[in-house]
């Protein structure tokens, strides 16, 4: 299990830039990914294999209205780029909580842990009934 405090990610609306016919990660997105990678190296957050669950406890930088899904892409991509998992397709369960409490600059508490395949089956069975 990996538990980390990371900086608040850029919105998906600012994460990508289109240059001609190419879509690239923006300067802000690359800076965020670099900052997350540095934190992961210092924390010694090694790679996790298999099916994973990720929990995001999001504390926005201010009280503006925000969409919770706009913080996920940059954060999950940065975790992959930093080596927490080989590909974000390994994440099969994702829980994101957007807190009403603000923190100057914002922050995200991230928990990544292995998810047993039987747990996914149990959850799907409960939803279906």
Image: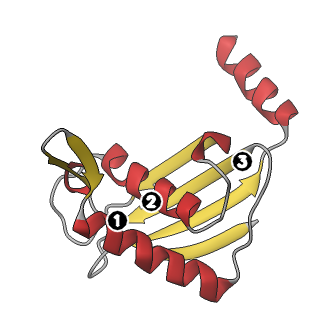
Q: Furthest-bottom residue in view?
A: 42
Q: Residue at x 34, y 65 (%)?
A: 9
Q: CA distance from mark 1 to mark 2?
A: 6 Å
Question: Which of the 4 image quadrants contains residue 112?
Answer: bottom right
**Mark 2 = which residue?**
75
Is residue 8 in sight in this rendering? Answer: no
Percent of width and height locating residue 121: 80, 24
Binning the other alpha carbons within 10 Å of mark 3 as few (below 14), some (14 to 19) or many (20 upward) gives many
Classify 44 as above or below 61: below
Percent of width and height locating residue 114: 79, 52
Q: Tell me the element at label 1.
A: loop
**Mark 1 = which residue?**
9
Q: Furthest-top residue in view?
A: 129
Percent of width and height locating residue 41: 62, 83
Q: Residue at x 34, y 68 (%)?
A: 30
Q: Tell me the element at label 3.
A: strand
**Mark 3 = which residue?**
52
Q: Earlier in the sequence, mark 1 or mark 2?
A: 1
Q: Residue at x 48, y 75 (%)?
A: 36
Question: Which of the 4 image quadrants contains residue 8?
Answer: bottom left
Q: CA distance from mark 2 to mark 3?
A: 15 Å
Percent of width and height locating residue 58: 41, 62
Q: Residue at x 31, y 48 (%)?
A: 70
Q: CA distance from mark 1 to mark 3?
A: 21 Å
- Badges 2 and 3: C-beta atoms under 8 Å apart? no
Binning the other alpha carbons within 10 Å of mark 2 as few (below 14), some (14 to 19) or many (20 upward) gives many
- Badges 1 and 2: C-beta atoms under 8 Å apart? yes
Q: Quadrant of the C terminus?
A: top right
Q: Nearer the viewer, residue 22 or 72?
A: 22
Classify 75 as above or below 62: above
Q: Earlier in the sequence, mark 2 or mark 3?
A: 3
Binning the other alpha carbons within 10 Å of mark 1 as few (below 14), some (14 to 19) or many (20 upward) gives many
């Amino acid at each position: 299990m990996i538990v980390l405090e990371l900086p608040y990610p850029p919105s998906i609306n600012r994460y990508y830039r289109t240059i001609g016919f190419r879509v690239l990660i923006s300067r802000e997105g690359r800076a965020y990914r670099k900052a997350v990678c540095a934190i992961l190296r210092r924390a010694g957050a090694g790679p996790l294999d298999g099916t994973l669950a990720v929990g995001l406890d999001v504390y926005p930088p201010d009280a503006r209205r925000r969409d919770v899904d706009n913080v996920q892409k940059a954060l999950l991509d940065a975790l992959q780029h930093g080596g927490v998992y080989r590909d974000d397709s390994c994440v099969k369960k994702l829980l994101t909580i957007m807190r009403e409490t603000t923190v100057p600059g914002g922050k995200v508490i991230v928990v990544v842990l292995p998810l047993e395949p039987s747990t996914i089956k149990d959850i799907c069975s409960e939803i279906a009934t």
